[in-house]
Image (spheres, helix red, strand yellow):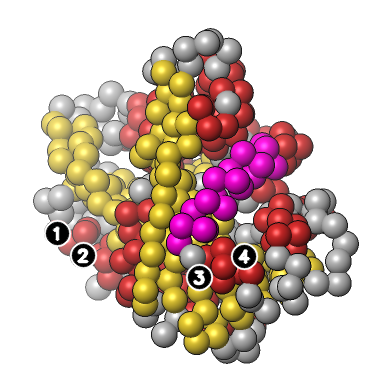
Amino acid sequence: MNTVNCRKLSAEGITLAKKLVSPAPRYGKQISLPFGLNFNELLAELDEKALGKRKIEFFEIVLGNKTVGFCYYAVYDRRKSAEIAAIFVPDYRSCGFSQPIIGFLKEHISKYYPELIRIEATASSLNVAAISALLKGGLRIEGVLPCGYVRGENISDAILFGMIIENRGKQPTSLYRFDSFKDKRKERNRLIAQGKAVLDHETKLMNDSGVYDRLATSDKIIDIGCGFGQFVGWLASEFPLVKEITGVDPSKSMIRESIVPASSRIKLINSDGLGFLRSLRAGQVDIICLRFVLNHIPFRYWQDWLTAIRRVLKPKGLVCLTLADANYYRTYPELQLMDIMFEHKRTVREKNGGIWNAPSLIGRALHAAGYKNIIQRSLCLTTDHIGRQNYARTIGDQFVWGIENSWKKTGEAARKSLLLASRREDFWGQVKFGIHVGERP
């Protein structure tokens, strides 16, 4: 029995593809490509000089010595994801999206794109064999989206699978990368301004929850995702009796450009947060803080983080999580461009395994990780609290980061529309943020 294999495009394969593939195919005679592409456009993207937002990898599917179809994937660097597809000649339908094809693509992707953690694939919901092959090919489903595509004159229902490539060794655990920003100065200024705008109100929540008093009597505090060290510096100034305060961040740039004053009580460490926690001895820390961090960690890693934190805490030690609730973002007048960006960012985050409404799940996650005496406190920050300009430059702007490459000038236009609106006397905005506290038994 002949086995299905993949190989690089041959001259014969290219000739066949140009004949068979069309953006307006004749049903039963030609093959359609998604998004109105034609084969020549895909071939043009194989030239490294023509690279844009994505990189196309294209292969022939062969049975024996006969080319029976093609498989390809498009890699998107910023999203660390890829779209994969397989298409077959009209007179050959028995192969489907088979395990050998999936195995070949996984092996090739792993070799040439080792940071890639997510792929998408489309299969007809009627093609049980194709769906089964996707599941058996070592891919774990992260999301399923019903959709439709056109093949010739017929419209077929389909399922778009978002899948995680399993067993890939060390994988990124954060959706936020400071060092990926082209204008790091602008992002640095935003983070520092946001920290100043929020800290006084965060202190009120700490008082209301009892965390403030616990911080004051602690010996050892760790701030994971410390950024430029604002909170670490505040802790050192606010609580002079704390013996050791450690800030940890994976960005060398942020640690290097820290605004923390020199002190024998303060240590700043450049490290992946989860790896750092796992390197510590058990039961040695009083309080571990994660400020605006958990919402940037894919949901599938939450239990790993919370379990690692619980191991390091002393009995009765606390984990304190601070973050904004994006669902409470509002402005008056309503800004359509910002709302569009808001929805796009939600889609991008959820596609990459993130949770948009993270506060609604934190309590449950803390309980599942074994924490007790779980407390939640929150408040709405409005322009009445922090001023119109502060809101526009810090709270509202947080929804735009990370999408510059895909939206180009649109992201900057959204920022400008927000700043312009904030000059109006009747401009108003709000965003909800809060803290969640869990105690190790």
The residue located at (54%, 81%) in the rendering is: 313
Q: Which residue is mark 4?
A: 224
Looking at the rendering, in which quadrant would you find the N terminus? Answer: bottom left
Q: Residues within 10 Å of mark 1 (few under 14, many from 20)?
A: few
* Residue 383 numbered tag: none
Q: Disc 2 residue type?
A: Ser
Mark 4 or 1 closer to N-term?
Answer: 1
Q: Which residue is mark 1?
A: 128
Q: Secondary structure at mark 3?
A: strand
Q: Which residues are magenta?
A: 190-209
Q: Disc 3 residue type?
A: Val
**Disc 2 from disc 3: Cα separation:** 42 Å
Query: Magenta residues: mostly which secondary structure?
Result: helix
* Residue 132 numbered tag: 2
Mark 3 or 4 closer to N-term?
Answer: 4
Q: Disc 1 residue type?
A: Val
Q: Which residue is mark 3?
A: 319
Determine whether label 2 and label 3 are within 8 Å by CB: no
**Disc 3 from disc 4: Cα separation:** 11 Å
Q: Is residue 400 magenta?
A: no
Q: Disc 4 residue type?
A: Ile
